[in-house]
Amino acid sequence: MNYYEIYDRYSGELLTRGNAAECRKALGCASLDSFYALANRARRGINKKYRVVIKKGGQVDYPVLGKDDPLYQKEG
């Protein structure tokens, strides 16, 4: 599973980080496909608004809670 860190390209501010579903929700993308397209275009330099760092599972320095996440449990 990939984990994403999305930064504002101009200010360098961290906008969101997490798996694709978490980032999609935080950025307000309509679907996972639209988030994947945004990440791919930003990575290739086509989308100039965001800078995307993609990490493979196990390479992140923050806890990934998944279904144990309190926010996830509130939604369920």
Image: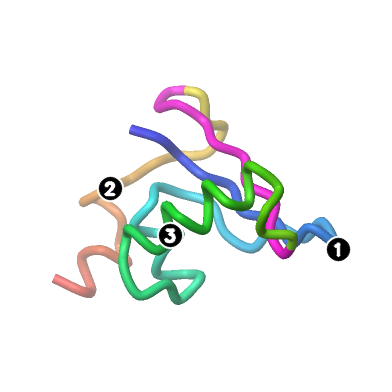
The image position of residue 32, as x and y in percent, is: 32, 60
Give the position of the N terminus as an image quadrant: top left
The question of residue 55 being in magenta is answered with: yes
Q: Residues within 10 Å of mark 1 (few under 14, many from 20)?
A: few
Q: Main secondary structure of the magenta part?
A: strand
User: Which residue is found at the position 28% from the left and 47% from the top?
Assistant: 66
Q: Position of residue 37 (x, y in %)?
A: 45, 55
CA distance separating discs 2 and 1: 29 Å
Disc 1 residue type (three-letter): Ser
Q: Which residue is mark 3?
A: 35
For this rendering, which residue is in front, 72 or 47?
47
Give the residues drawn in magenta, as a range. Answer: 49-58
Question: Label 3 amino acid?
Answer: Phe
Question: Which callout, 3 or 2, points to the residue nearer the camera?
Answer: 3
Left or right, 23 with reference to 5: left
- Foreground: disc 1 or disc 3: 3
Q: Position of residue 38 (x, y in %)?
A: 52, 58
Name the residue located 39 percent from the left edge and 59 percent from the top edge. Answer: 22
Q: Which residue is mark 2?
A: 66
Picture residue at 23% right of the left edge, 73% below the top: 74
